[in-house]
Amino acid sequence: MRVKFNYWSTNDHTLIDLLANGLDDLKELDNQLYSLFCVEHKRQMNELMMVASCSIVPPAVLICQSMSAGNVTAEGYPGRRYHAGCENIDAIENAAIERAKQVFHAQYANVQPHSASSANQIVLFSLLNPGDTILGMDLPSGGHLSHGAKISYSGTCFNAVSYSLSEDFLIDYDQVESLAIKHRPKLIICGTTAYPRQVDFKRFREIADKVGAYLLADISHIAGLVIAGLHPSPIDYAHVITTCTHKQIFGPRGGLILSGKDAGMLLHDKKKSLAEHIQRAVFPFFQGAPIPNMIAAKAMALQLTQTENYKTTMYRILDNSRVLGAALMSLGFDIITGGTDTHIVLIDLTRNGISGNLAERALEQCGIIVNKNNVPNRNSKSTISMGIRLGTNSLAQRGFGQIEMMCCAEIISKVIGNMTGDTWDTVAVNDSIRKNVREQVGELCNRFPIFNY
Ligand SMILES: *Cc1c(COP(=O)(O)O)cnc(C)c1O
């Protein structure tokens, strides 16, 4: 196989030529990969994507990720790089920083973290010493691995204490406060992966102040609702805010670190500010060279969050999840907290006697993509998840509205009511039901063939 170096062959090639050549070459040089990309794209178009952490990246953001700006090694920060030739990369990164600050009303933004998990790691190590105590939500309640789980660096490098949820599945702020007073953490983390209600950042800050702890708000799941003003912002309550850029920001896989009014506060050494500590922890402490094309994609995605279309989509995400939750309840399902204030709807399948694992598999067989989720408080000793987590990001981006969400609730109910088998390998859905649901899924998808980012 001969590689055609079309990439460099003309002086006047446009970006379109470059990308088109790339696609032609891919097809010719690696048909296996090319075919996989095609079928995966088709799958995404033709299935109901209801995994709460998913969303669809708009073409303008997707294309930034393929740009040759990624060829540049640019260790350091704009204006202070360790390599020459970074003038354009500096401008890209400065644009991303400015937009992140503007979008979140932040005083400080770092756009280099490769993921939200890295962003959290960077924040923990920039503010704490190994062995210090942190307080975060436990994993079974919906905390993230990086919030102090024992199977993560966060729970092994630090003395992690965790809070859980009350009997009615809400954050028990009094419990958080008493744990904080008892254990005197140096840092408290709020932010969750499977919490359908609003987080009271103000209350968290009051607790943090009471014990002299830093507050880190990880808004990975709800960043878009925060941007659109549909969930309170933590910007001036938390010392530091982290988020990934690939859930509700509709950006590339990556992370952001932000700070509001505390950005300039001097830390323990009384020499450097909080923002300066974070800046050094991102580079050179944890990361090497940033990924310029991903930073460009973050800049593009942040820009799109300022459009009317984005705001409408965020509103639809929220409206759709409320309708979905209500419809599922009226079909007899137990919905955790009895509804939602976010994009997340959690179904508790305990009463149905079906594990989340098997429900996930049965729904997948019918083209409905969800993920199993632990039901807080129910099965803390068991490894079997008794719930499933649904999210409305992708479907709302597609243009689904209330009527479609009611259809979704009905077909989810139909699948769960017609499952057989009790292991991953044997689980199946009644043949005619499966065909019928597949058809309905196809029909719903066809009704909204173009994503309305
Ligand atoms: C998804 C998520 C993360 C992890 O993001 P990655 O970029 O995949 O590392 C971290 N924290 C919370 C709360 C999340 O929901």
Image (cartoon, grey):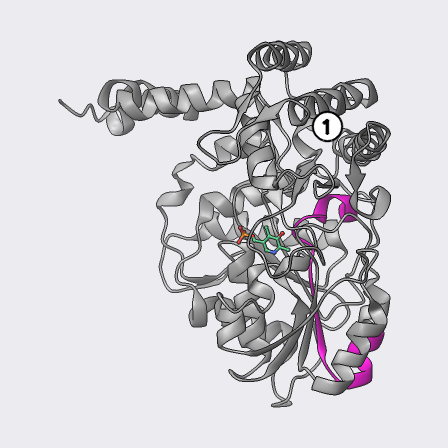
- The answer to if 63 sits in the magenta stretch is no
- Name the quadrant of the C terminus: top right
Residue 13 visible to the viewer: no
Decide whether residue 216 is among the magenta residues.
Answer: yes
Image quarter of residue 199: bottom right
When asked about the image quadrant of residue 134, the answer is bottom right
Q: Amino acid at mark 1?
A: Ala
Residue 419 drawn above or below residue 138: above
Of residues 407 and 109, the one nearer the viewer is 407
Farthest-out residue, left: 1
- Mark 1: give few (<14), some (14-19) or many (20+) Cα within 10 Å: many
Q: Tell me the SS state at disc 1.
A: helix
Is the CB of the residue bearing disc 1 within 8 angstroms of ligand 1?
no
Q: Is residue 303 above or below residue 168?
A: above
Q: Give residue 63's position: percent from left, percent from top.
A: 49, 31
Residue 15 visible in image: yes
Q: How many marks?
A: 1
Residue drawn at point x = 66 percent, y = 11 percent: 440
Return the residue at label 1.
396
The residue lying at 70 percent from left, 40 percent from top is 349
Q: Position of residue 44 (x, y in %)?
A: 54, 24
Residue at (75, 25) in percent of width and height: 409
The part of the chain drawn in magenta is 206-227
Q: Nearer the viewer, residue 257 or 401?
A: 401
The spot of residue 449 in percent (x, y) is: 63, 13
* Position above or below: 359 against 182: above
